[in-house]
Amino acid sequence: MAVSENGDEIDRRGWRYRARRSWQRHWQLYLLILPPLVYFAIFKYLPMVNAIIAFKDYNVVAGVWGSPWAGWKHFSSFFGNLVFWQLIRNTFTLSAYYVLASFPIPIILALALNEVRLRAFKQTVQLVTYAPYFISTVVIVSMTILILSPRIGLVGDVFGLFGVPAVDFLGRADYFRHVYVWSDIWQTTGYSAVIYMAALASIDPSLYEAAKVDGASRIQKIIHVDIPGLMPTAIIILILGVGNIMQVGFEKAFLLQNPLNLSQSEIISTYVYKTGLLNANFSLATAINLFNAMINLVLLVGVNAVAKRVTGRSLW
Amino acid sequence: MVAFNPDETSEIARARLKKRSLNVQLVDRLFVAAVYILLATFLAIVLLPLIYIVASSFSSPQAVSAGRVGLWPVDFSLRGYEVALRDPKIVSGFLNSIFYTVAGTLISVVLTIAVAFPLSRVDFFGGSLITKLIVFTMLFSGGLIPTYMVVRSMGMLNTPWAMIIPNAIGVWQVILARAYFRDAIPKELYEAARVDGAGDIRFLLLVAIPLAKPMIAVIALMYAIWQWNSYFDALIYLRTDALHPLQLVLRNILILNTQSNLGDATAMLERQQLADLLKYSLIVISTVPVLLIYPFVARHFTKGIMLGSVKG
């Protein structure tokens, strides 16, 4: 290859030459990119260096480097803690439940929208279902609490219609996961469907022509053309979901927590926050965080490798 | 496959096709009806809670507190909004949020362009290494406490800077902006600029940015909505109430049930009723700005999502 993608001739001389030439030509670009690079160094890479305190007994006076080494002490104290398995179970269950429950619904919505010929109706449904994505977590959680409230909420009324006594959804640990997952699905289904809509729009029109010629019904068309066309996108989204399974967001779980549901709502990220910032045990919190990040990285790389082998699809 | 079979007479074949297509048409009609019902259900599930919240916010404190409000205001009243707008904490939260959103978005957009434009240039030496280093921060991070320590050591704790700087650049937005710069600017323009002796920064300001206006609008709105909606940074970095953004004020009132200033209401029962009503009004007040601008950007968000998923 003597020509690069944009048609420039590729230089076969060494990288030193290319670097010098790039600097001479583009020194202004290097100047431009300097502030963002400093930002990434300070706020993204410096914390990775600071994470070394997971292996130390950090104290503020001695600082990161002056604090004495502690080896694997914090990790083993976390593994030995009674709360360890509970945290792992809570985090994993919540996340797995979420990934599985939230996977098919946007696909159904997108397939259904794709069948609609009435433009106005289609756009209304899309606009409305997409809207909750832009509502803040604080407001979503508040709405959830208000609507589920047995005293004033809407759901209590609906239960009343059927003569069922109102249930205190937030006061019982067993309900926490359902509340978390389904309120999230309520919020994000419209947004996720948009991704599938785009995938549907990019399906080769000649496939639909062929289906028509063959006299396929709409359902057959969905099964034989639409769904196969969605598969690549669906797989990528599933990979991302499974890969991030130990990375459930802090924001929402923390807001939905109360003393009554803590036995199921305490997840790794909320525990890290409490250990680190509320109890000021920096080293232990960092160790837990690091452990979680490592699991997550391994999961993401592993799931991606499996997906690549099985389906030929990969994130990178 | 329903192709003509040469052994049959064309008449039989045509009759078959017709019969089959009639069946297909019937099934299709039923199916379309089912699709409309399904979509109407989706619409109702999303819409009803929103209507309920808005209806409640315009009802009287007594009606809300007694759970009498359904999908239409009961005893129409604006008490909730009155109380909300007279509460100094809520007003200051609102103003703070506007400041953080405007300042944060400005800084974020400038920094994002400053990193994305060089990375979009093919002959920018070191670009692929820098891209890898930036994308890596999406996969792995030092974590909450180590980041907190950095912010603390920078002296940003309990200052507005903590709301603006530590999460100034989104990797997703960088990928998006880079792809846009790469695709939207014809290579000939670079050549022309080089002949004219225009430097890269001049080129960026006079040619690239005007060409990339739609993309810049999209990432600006992404940053703005994100900033307006976030509470976590404020929770960990800000101690002083006067600095709190709206979302944190909301969290205290809506979720922790901290009583806000309820004005002239003194009786216990009245206070409780007003506190209930206030929650609904606050939800509406804080969400309306975002929902007003969202329809204008939804279309571009879609493009953004697609770009991101294609370029990985």
Image (spheres, helix red, strand yellow):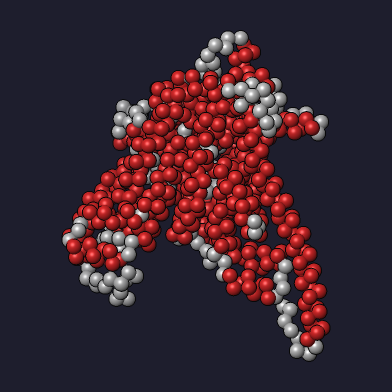
Left or right position of B267 against A6 = right
Q: Position of residue B38 (x, y in %)?
A: 71, 51
Q: Position of residue A143 (x, y in %)?
A: 60, 32
Q: Position of residue B237 (x, y in %)?
A: 40, 30
- Nearer the observer, A209 or A146: A209
Residue at far top of view: B267
Residue at 52% of width from left, 22% of height from top? B84
- Residue A122 visible: yes
Q: Quadrant of residue B193?
A: bottom left
- Residue A21 visible: no
Q: How many discs mark residues in the rendered view?
A: 0
Q: Quadrant of the N terminus of chain B?
A: bottom right
Residue at far bottom of view: B7
- Nearer the observer, B58 or A227: B58
Left or right position of A10 against A272 = left
- Nearer the observer, B55 or A166: B55
Q: Position of residue A234 (x, y in %)?
A: 58, 58
Left or right position of B158 against A271 = left
Q: Quadrant of the C terminus of chain B?
A: bottom left
A284 in relation to A299, above or below: above
A116 in relation to A136, above or below: below
Left or right position of B129 against B246 = left
B220 in relation to A315, above or below: above
Residue at 64% of width from left, 56% of height from top? A118
Residue at 54% of width from left, 24% of height from top? B81
Residue at 79% of width from left, 82% of height from top? B13
